[in-house]
Amino acid sequence: MRLGVIGGGQLGRMLIAAARELGVAVSVLDPDPEAACAVVADRFFVGDLTDASAVTALAEQCDVLTYEIEHINVSALQALAERVTLVRPAPQVLAIIQDKLVQKQHLAARGVPVPEFTAGRPGESAEAAAERLGYPCVFKARRGGYDGHGVLVCRDRSELERAGVDAGWDASGWYLERYVPELREPAVVVARSVEGTLEVYPPFEMMFHPERNICDAVIVPARLPGQARDRAAEVAVAAAESFGSAGLFAVELFLSRDGAITVNEIAPRPHNSGHVTIESCVTSQFEQHLRAVCGFPLGSSALLSPGAMVNLLAQSGAGGPARIAGVSEALAFAGVHLHLYGKQRSRAGRKMGHVTALAGSTEEALRRARAAAAAVRIT
């Protein structure tokens, strides 16, 4: 089996590690010759992810094509799929998910619960749009946002004015959501096979950096009441099934203070929230993604142990060639596993790796993971 992966970041690198165990050869396309996958892929192509000719050249070397990033050329994938190249998840899934407003419209039309949202109207000011939806509200970029970029929370008109949104407001590029006063932010990873069978992972709980608005830690199982845990899985399955495609779907959710579960957004690929599965579950999310897109039977998603994951971010002021210290100190903690992504260059806040820890409770696993992560210094 020959697999092509569009995007050469850390997700692709961890996919390759899982592919080695299954005997799957992996070719990768990425614009950066020093991408995380460059030294581990069986074949590595340097090229723009939106370049149809580069994507086609990759596909010609593969039996199945997949992706580890959303910001790619959907038209090229659709053309390849029409020529009987297997693209999984299907190109039409990516076309929906790339535009977050279209994603929300797709889910809402199929009865999947989402926060109240609205598109900006032509010629409408940001202030008028916010007043129409009501405060607090969240301005979200329809395309290209990630790790807190492209998201602006405005709790009242003064915050909107301080942010200066109207100066750059383009109703075609943004949409608004009603702010959800969340109690927790769970995520559920759902795998769907070519035959339509499902494997559903136990809900994870994401924790966010208070300043960067980026996920910095995840625990499993999530701290959810039994009823909320069942509902989270139910909503995630409905969201994943709405696309009707084989693949892995990471469904980010809100648990609001009134107990409602709604979908924040979906990634049709392995996701930061599922990194802990490498050690904590029978089948990691990376092996599961391979099984789903390659047409293999799905593996068990059962939890082996409570676990926690903490992202390793480059320190403030970091820039240039990456220097990593503290590896021995981190590995001295019991039950800890260190994953470094092989990125050659650092910048403040960039994800350079992660630490996972297993323990008898999520609290102890998180304590160990945070202590080990604190020992690692990336400059």
Image (spheres, helix red, strand yellow):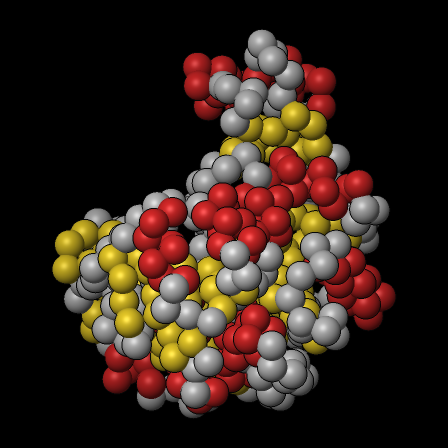
The residue drawn where x is 46% and y is 80% is 1
- Residue most toward the front? 83
Above or below for 328 versus 71: below
**Percent x, y of residue 25:** 38, 79
The part of the image, by quadrant, that contains residue 177 is top right
Q: Look at 65% across and 25% down and name the residue there.
A: 119
Residue plotted at (25% across, 57% down): 46
At which x and y percent is residue 122?
A: 60, 13
Compare residues 202 and 3 and report the one nearer the observer.
Answer: 3
| Res. 34 in view | yes
Question: Which image quadrant: the C terminus?
Answer: bottom left
- Where does the image place residue 55, in percent across and percent down from the top left? 38, 54
Tell me residue 228's x, y (percent): 80, 63
Residue 196 or residue 85, whichever sits in front: 85
Residue 180 picture quarter: top right
The furthest residue to the left = 321
Question: Front-most of 329 and 95?
Answer: 95
Indicate left or right for 62 with 301 as reference.
left
Residue visible at 64% across and 66% down in the picture: 246
Residue 269 seen anywhere in this rendered image of the structure: no
Q: Nearer the viewer, residue 181 or 104?
A: 104
14 over 127 or under it: above or below: below
Q: From the viewer's perspective, is 85 left or right of 251?
A: left
Left or right: where does residue 95 sit relative to residue 45?
right
